Image (cartoon, rainbow, N blue to C red):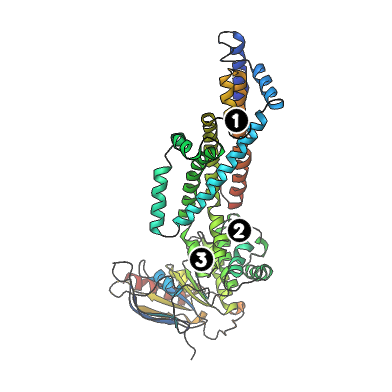
Amino acid sequence: MTRPILEFNDVGFGYGDQDQVLRGCSVSLERGSFVVLLGPSGCGKSTMLRLAAGFLRPRSGSVLFDGQAIHAPDRRRILIFQEQDQLFPWRRLLANTALPLMWGPDHCQRSGAEDRARDALAQVGLAGNLNDFPHQLSGGMKQRAVLARALAVGAELLLLDEPFASLDAFSRESLQETLVGAWARHGSTVLFVTHDIHEAVRIGGEIWFLHRAGQPGQVERISLPRTSPQGVSPQGVSPQGVSLRDMDTPEAIAIVKSIRDRLTR
Amino acid sequence: MSFLLIPLLAVGWQLLAMSGTVSPLLVPGLDVIIVALWRDLSHGTLSYQLLFSLGLVGAGTLLGAFIAVVLAVVASLGREALRSVRLLTALLHPLPGIALLPLVVLWAGTGTPAVLLVMIHAALWPVYLNLQTGLDEMPPRYSEMTRNWQLRRAGIVLHVIVPAVFPSFLSGLRTAWARSWRALIAAEMVFGAAGHFGGIGWYLFERRVYMDTPGLYAGLFMVMAAGVLMDALLFGSLERITARRWGREAR
């Protein structure tokens, strides 16, 4: 059995003097999986992502990446947020994507960095927008670019904090497909936070339901077999081999209902 | 309709001068002013004095801006450093340059260094305040992203911080130039001739002493023209280019 890429071991965390947001949180993420973190507002979803990214340190317990304790942010674990302020407005799209490659630990030459950036942007459907400034792009295109940049950097673990929440329904669905396609192609691991049950069921291979009332940090794992990541090789699988869940099927409707029941419980 | 304002003012001025109701020493005709302007530009020292003043104001503004950048770097070293620089700014920024003149005369005499000191004071604080605002308003996400990518410090400074604060810096420089220009003319009129011919302020002072009212108006016209040209052509264009590239609305 391979070692989990991410492990929360009895993690406790709180902001300042406030009550603990997470208490005794233990859960592990398998390499190559696509997990959606779902739960009511304030249950600690974003906190878990920031702990995994290394922007926060646990009060108690430990968070491990590839078996090692996380001490600081690292480009192998890229955190992606909602649309705002993730692209530098003064840089064209290609330059925005190439920046972390040229000035990060990779020390890439400009031409090499731009080649990688060009490839990544093409994979998310932005091959024709390399010379655009961010203000010339729609919200959905900006998020595609942010995803492309994370892929170009070679992130092993993508930590997405409600990345499509501010997009219209059409852009959101299209981006969900792009994300799942990129995940399948690259063999990276995804931990995706959302408060949208439909989105969670549509894209997730597994849902981690994070409880709030009385049991902060308790994770209930709900497996969604049809887009299960089991069998995904480290090299990834063809994006054609992965499909998003059809939300009109009785099975999907039943899953949504059971999760909604948990939320209102 | 605003473009009609200048011709209307000129016509009104000329009519007033020709009516004979006001002494030509107070309101000379435009023709006399234009002749004086041409005389002093082509045969006199006005053009040299204007260029001298512009050179001085450029040097003063750039020196002030440089010190402002140093202050911003110092302020970024820690919370106490930021508090100290903010306190210094709060104390010195409201102090008018003209109030410093007696002290400046004691420290630096009445030559070019004295004028430069006054201009540095005029330019430094607006540039620093704008720079600090730019830094304060930089989205916190930029810092998170650069930490996440493990970007090298040089990359962060060159490709994130400098471009992020550039529009604020430019807007501070624009205010600084305008304030330096005013401070310069006031200082030149008080200190007398700096350099070989003195600057435009000294020119105005001399015209007043000789009761050369047309020359005085010609000098004032050049002060306004230089101000408008620098503001609109240089800073206006730079801000427009930056705004377009940064995807913002130009002012």
**Upstream in the sequence, badge 1 or badge 3?**
3
Picture quadrant of residue B81: bottom left
Q: CA distance from mark 1 to mark 3?
A: 50 Å
Q: Give the residue displayed 62% in from the left and 19% down from the top.
A: B214
The residue beneath circle 1 is B200
Residue lying farthest to the right in this orientation? B42
Q: Amino acid at mark 2?
A: Arg
The residue beneath circle 2 is A91
Q: Amino acid at mark 3?
A: Met
Picture quadrant of residue B192: top right
Picture quadrant of residue A181: bottom right
Q: Give the residue displayed 41% in from the left and 60% down from the top.
A: B78
From the top left corner, tell me how far across and down residue A254 is, in percent. Answer: 42, 75
Instruction: Give neighbour class at mark 1: few <14, some 14-19, many 20+ (Cα, 10 Å).
Output: many
Q: Nearer the viewer, residue A47 or B240?
A: B240
Q: Nearer the viewer, residue B21 or A28?
A: B21
Q: Amino acid at mark 1?
A: Ile
Co-location on one chain, circles 1 and 3: yes
The residue beneath circle 3 is B145
Q: CA distance from mark 2 to mark 1?
A: 42 Å
Co-location on one chain, circles 3 and 2: no
Q: CA distance from mark 3 to mark 2?
A: 15 Å
From the top left corner, tell me how far across and down residue B80 is, in percent. Answer: 38, 57
- Looking at the figure, which quarter contains the C terminus of chain A? bottom left
